[in-house]
Image (cartoon, rainbow, N blue to C red):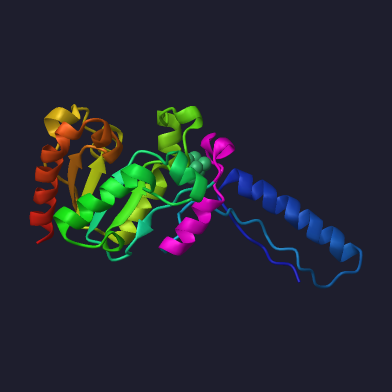
Amino acid sequence: MLTFFRYNDPMKNLRNALLLKQLYQLKELGYRYTTVTPYREQEPDLSLPHTLEALKAQALGCHLCELSKGRSHVVFGEGSPQATVLFVGEAPGVSEDSIGRVFVGRSGELLTKMIEGVLKIPRSQAYLTTLVKCRPLQESRPNSTQIHSCLAYLHKEIELIAPKVVVTLGETPYRYLTGEEGSLDQVHGVLHTHESYQIIPTYHPSYLLRNPALKPAVFEDLKRVKALLG
Ligand code: SF4
């Protein structure tokens, strides 16, 4: 059975002509039916999964950038899928990479204290993640190519969690989520209104461990977060 298709696109016309020729050849060989299907242009599906579990599964097998070569684990975000507050750090460190969990070690402990002490919610009720999901090589910072390769995962996490407030920890997540360049000394605690959530930048807990004099400033930033959460 022969089926004819008419397209205006020259490439499609060419492919259909070749297909037609193939079908006539099959007919001459005695075939009356064939499973050969006409050419159809198929767009590759580049969209990310629409559940956190599926998104995590995709990230765990990701080799989109060179950070995949040096990692022990992909460190995906964790916490409540219904979280109203989402914390974004820059990248997994040695401790996170070695066990595959976000914000562990001393800076993780400090962040947990900040969440539970100021926001008065258990850490498990927040959502914690990073700008890139694999540890940068030799403790360097992720470069912009690596960050842009990974950023779609973060945007999808934010879309799926739909938090009221995103707290950026350190200058890099702040810069990539707001497009602003300001120094954290000037912009920490300043509210940015995004389409569907608010962004509040503050210092990263690992920086705070090295600069404990900044603790009162972070305490004030988190009090602002608490006021927004209601
Ligand atoms: S850092 Fe992100 S983009 Fe790069 S390999 Fe890891 S998961 Fe993929």
Q: Quadrant of the N terminus?
A: bottom right
The image quarter in which residue 132 lies:
top left
| Residue at x 27%, y 63% (from the top left corner) | 125
- Residue for point 31% across, 49% down: 109
Which residue sits at x=27%, y=48%?
Answer: 111
What number of labels is visible?
Answer: 0
Give the residues drawn in magenta, as a range: 52-72
Q: Is residue 62 magenta?
A: yes
Rendering coords of residue 167 (x, y %): 22, 47
Residue 50 seen by the camera: no
Identify the main secondary structure in magenta. helix
Quadrant location of the C terminus in the rendered image: bottom left
**How far across and down, in percent of the image, does residue 146 sit?**
45, 34
Q: In this view, does 202 lie above or below 225?
A: above
The answer to whether 197 appears left or right of 129 in the picture is left
| Left or right: residue 43 compared with residue 208 | right
- Looking at the picture, does residue 69 appear above or below residue 34? above
Horizontal side of 219 relative to 73 (left or right) equals left
In this rendered view, identify the residue nearer to me: 130 or 111: 111
Q: Residue at x 52, y 54 (%)?
A: 58
Report x, y in % for residue 24: 82, 60
Q: Does the magenta stretch include residue 127?
A: no
Residue 45, percent from left and from top: 51, 54
Camera sees residue 229: yes
Q: Within the image, what quadrant is residue 157 found in? A: bottom left
